[in-house]
């Protein structure tokens, strides 16, 4: 597994953004952004499992969209059953539903 993915796994799931966030959140945003943007495709299924576990419950400064794009890059690269299994591991109800909707609309 790539270093970037392992570092994201270490940081853990994205928190929800909040109006109460202070300036210390900037460093965390930068860490997620730098790591997500440095990931080159293709991903392995195992890397996808780590990434799908990072979704915030709702939103985290639009970085959830970068995460979604990375997870969706596995569509067509793994079987539909594997992809659906991956989606089921998403801890966020909102993002799990988004991934499922986008899958069924594809």
Image (tube, grey):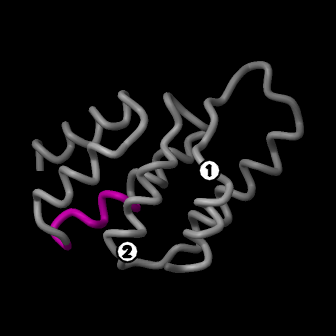
Percent x, y of residue 51: 46, 57
Category of crowding for the residue at label 1, using alpha-carbon neighbours closer than 10 angstroms: few (below 14), some (14–19), many (at least 20) = some
Q: Is residue 99 above or below residue 77?
A: above
Which residue is at 48% across, 43% downward? 55
Residue 1 lies left or right of residue 49; in this view the side is right
Category of crowding for the residue at label 2, using alpha-carbon neighbours closer than 10 angstroms: few (below 14), some (14–19), many (at least 20) = some
Percent x, y of residue 74: 27, 66
Percent x, y of residue 33: 65, 58
Which residue is at 47% across, 78% downward? 40
Q: Secondary structure at mark 1?
A: loop
Pick whichever of labels 2 and 1 is earlier in the sequence: 1
List the single residue furthest toward the top: 19
Residue 49 lies left or right of residue 97; in this view the side is right
Is-magenta flag for residue 47?
Answer: no
Which residue is at 31% across, 37% downward? 96
Which residue is at 51% across, 48% downward? 54
Q: How many marks?
A: 2
Q: Nearer the viewer, mark 2 or mark 1?
A: 1
Of the numbered discs in the image, which one, if any, rests on residue 43? 2
Residue 82 lies left or right of residue 42; in this view the side is left
Range of magenta residues:
70-77
**Quarter of image, res 23:** top right
Q: Nearer the viewer, residue 71 or 106?
A: 71
Of the numbered discs in the image, which one, if any, rests on residue 12? 1
Q: Is residue 46 above or below residue 53?
A: below
Q: Is residue 97 above or below residue 83?
A: above
Q: In terms of secondary structure, what is the magenta stretch mainly?
A: loop
């Amino acid at each position: 597994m790539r270093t970037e993915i392992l570092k994201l796994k270490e940081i853990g799931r994205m928190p929800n953004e909040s109006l109460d966030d202070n300036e210390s959140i900037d460093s965390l945003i930068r860490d997620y952004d730098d790591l997500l943007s440095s990931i080159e495709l293709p991903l392995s299924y195992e890397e996808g499992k780590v990434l799908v576990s990072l979704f915030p419950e709702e939103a985290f400064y639009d970085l959830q969209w970068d995460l979604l794009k990375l997870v969706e890059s596995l569509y067509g690269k793994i079987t539909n059953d594997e992809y659906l299994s991956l989606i089921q591991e998403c801890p966020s109800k909102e993002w799990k539903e988004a991934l499922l909707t986008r899958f069924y609309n594809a």
